[in-house]
Image (cartoon, rainbow, N blue to C red):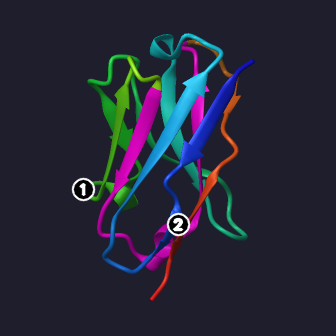
Amino acid sequence: QVQLVESGGGLVQPGGSLKLSCVASGFIFSNYMMRWYRQAPGKERVMVANIDTTGRRANYLDSVKGRFTISRDNARKTVYLQMNSLNFEDTAVYSCHARYPGHDNGYWGQGTQVTVSS
């Protein structure tokens, strides 16, 4: 049974930090590219960051470059999203996604809420 379970969301003040985790099970994690998406209220879901299977290459949404860092630990079957200097526009539900290279579909987690508020 495939599962992606996110954690680490919560309420944070502007300028604060959070670290999201996504633990995978039920598939060979190290073979899958991993992504973090977010969806703000009333907006479409957008990809925030992705990372290749080795963890050596990553890409980011322009608005989070320099503030967010995606990483992975294949031994722990976990992908992380370190989020620094959070602002109101970062408020959203954050979900992780696993995709096998060359395939269109993949697996989704249930999401974790991040709220930036003073």
The residue sitting at 37% across, 80% down in the picture is 14
The residue sitting at 49% across, 54% down in the picture is 8
In this view, 76 is above or below 94: above
Q: To which quarter of the image does residue 91 belong? A: bottom right
Residue 43: x %, y % from top left: 68, 65
The residue beneath circle 2 is 10
Residue 24: x %, y % from top left: 57, 26
Q: CA distance from mark 1 to mark 2?
A: 21 Å
Quadrant assignment for the N terminus: top right
Res 66 label: 1
Q: To which quarter of the image does residue 73 belong? A: top left
86 in magenta: yes
Residue 107: x %, y % from top left: 68, 27
Foreground: 32 or 29? 29
Residue 109: x %, y % from top left: 66, 39
13 in magenta: no
The magenta-colored residue range is 78-101
Secondary structure under the numbered disc 1 in the rendered image? loop
Label 1 is placed on what type of residue? Gly
* Total number of numbered discs in the rendering: 2
Foreground mark, 1 or 2?
2
Label 2 is placed on what type of residue? Gly
Q: Give the side of residue 102 with respect to residue 104, left or right.
A: left
Q: Give the side of residue 4 with respect to residue 33, left or right.
A: right
In this view, 21 is above or below 52: below
The residue sitting at 57% across, 44% down in the picture is 6
Foreground: 80 or 100? 80
Q: Give the side of residue 110 with respect to residue 24, left or right.
A: right
